[in-house]
Structure formats: structure tokens, C-alpha cells
Image (spheres, grey):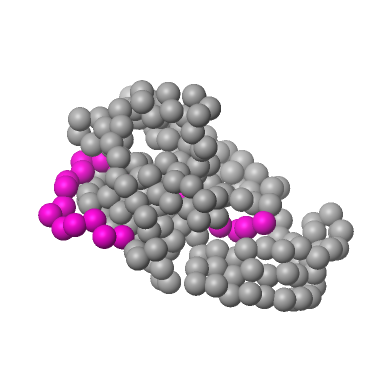
Amino acid sequence: MTTQNGLLNDLQNQKITVRIFLFTVMSDNLYSKKSIIKERISELKTKKFRFEINRIQLPNGHEGEYGQIIFPNAALAVPITADNKVILLRQYRFAVSRYLLEFPAGTLEIGETPINSIKREIQEETGFSAEKWDRLGSLVNAPGYSDEVIHLFLARELSKLNSEVKGDLDEDIEVLMMDPEELDNLISSGDEILDAKTVTAWFRAKQFLDKL
């Protein structure tokens, strides 16, 4: 009887798994629809991305000229120390002419996976390495004009490296440590101009940690 009950439970769990899988596939098929590029009008290549203007046919049949940034995607880490401190960066961003509070992140190199990219970036930008990594999902940063996807990770079991934090030549960065409550208060105060990927990643990290 125990074996039969166990088999029934396994079958029921498999049915649930299949239903979830089918729902996910159906949802992806429902909401993921590619536009058709009818004509390439112009293109500008930069160091990290390219900007295209194309004549595009949307899924609803409408045609028009649209500009789009084509980006190689990125990865971001929410680093948390053993004594529950959150590591952040105060980083200068020339496009908005100010220093923003951000989690360490970076662009994927050619052929690089998101996890390998962020393991490299966290060492270069913070001077720490992490032994424990958990995926927090992905986000689209600016879907109105860019195809960039940022992969989010939680980084724990940190170790301070002996090497000096250098970063890239064009990076102006200060490494900060905050209590979680301090970061929450800073975000909710309205006094800080917020970096969208950082707020989203912090929200996801807190959801993940609350379930542990």
C-alpha cells in the first residue's frame, strides 16, 4: 500500500510539474512575438553596443521606423557579507552627470556566461570574491528602446581579495557597505535618484532570503 501511495504521489507531482511546464511554455508563446525587420535604414557601432534604425513590422501588423540599442546583455550581483552587510558602489555615470548607488554589474564579454561574467566583475569592482551564488532571475532594463537583458545573482560567503580594486580606466567607483535597513531607508526616502536595476535586484534578493 505504501509503495502504491508513493507511486500515486510521484505521478501527481509529475502531473503538476507538466502542468506548470505547459503553462510556462504557453505563456512564453503568448507574450513572446518577434517583430519583422523590413529594412535596415542606418547603424552606428560603439564600444559596447550598436544603435540601429530599422523599418519594422510589429506583431499587430503596423509598420514604422524605430530606433533600437542592440546590447550584449549584462550580469549583476547583490553581495552580502557574513555579518549581513550589503556591498554597493557609488559610481559616476556620465549620461546623467552624477554618482549613482549601484550593485556591481557588467557587460558580458563575447562567449562569456552570465555567472562567469559577474564572478569576474565582483572581483574587479569590489575586491571581493564569492563562493555561494544564487540566481535571482533576469530583468529588461529599457524595453522601449533596448534589447538588453540583465541577469541577477545573489553573492554570499564573500572573501576579501589581497589585490587592489582597479576596475576599468573609465570607471569612477567608491565601494560602500550598508546595513539592509539603511539601504531600505535610502530607497524609500525619495532623496536618492534610484538606479532601476539595483532596486529590482534588491527586491528580488530580499524575496529570496525571506524564503530561507
Which image quarter: residue 65? Answer: bottom right
Q: Position of residue 46 (x, y in %)?
A: 55, 72
148 within the magenta span: yes
Locate the N terminus and report the quarter of the image it occupies: top left
Give the magenta range: 145-167
Q: Position of residue 142 (x, y in %)?
A: 61, 50
Q: Is residue 147 visible?
A: yes
Q: Residue at x 30, y 54 (%)?
A: 125
23 within the magenta span: no
Q: Nearer the viewer, residue 169 or 81?
A: 169
Q: Position of residue 107 (x, y in %)?
A: 44, 61
Which image quarter: residue 83? Answer: top left
**Above or below: residue 130 compared with residue 2:** below
- Residue 9 relative to residue 59: left or right: left
Q: Residue at x 29, y 45 (%)?
A: 175
Q: Is residue 153 visible?
A: no
Q: Residue at x 23, y 36 (%)?
A: 81
Q: Position of residue 183 (x, y in %)?
A: 39, 29
- Residue 105 relative to residue 81: left or right: right
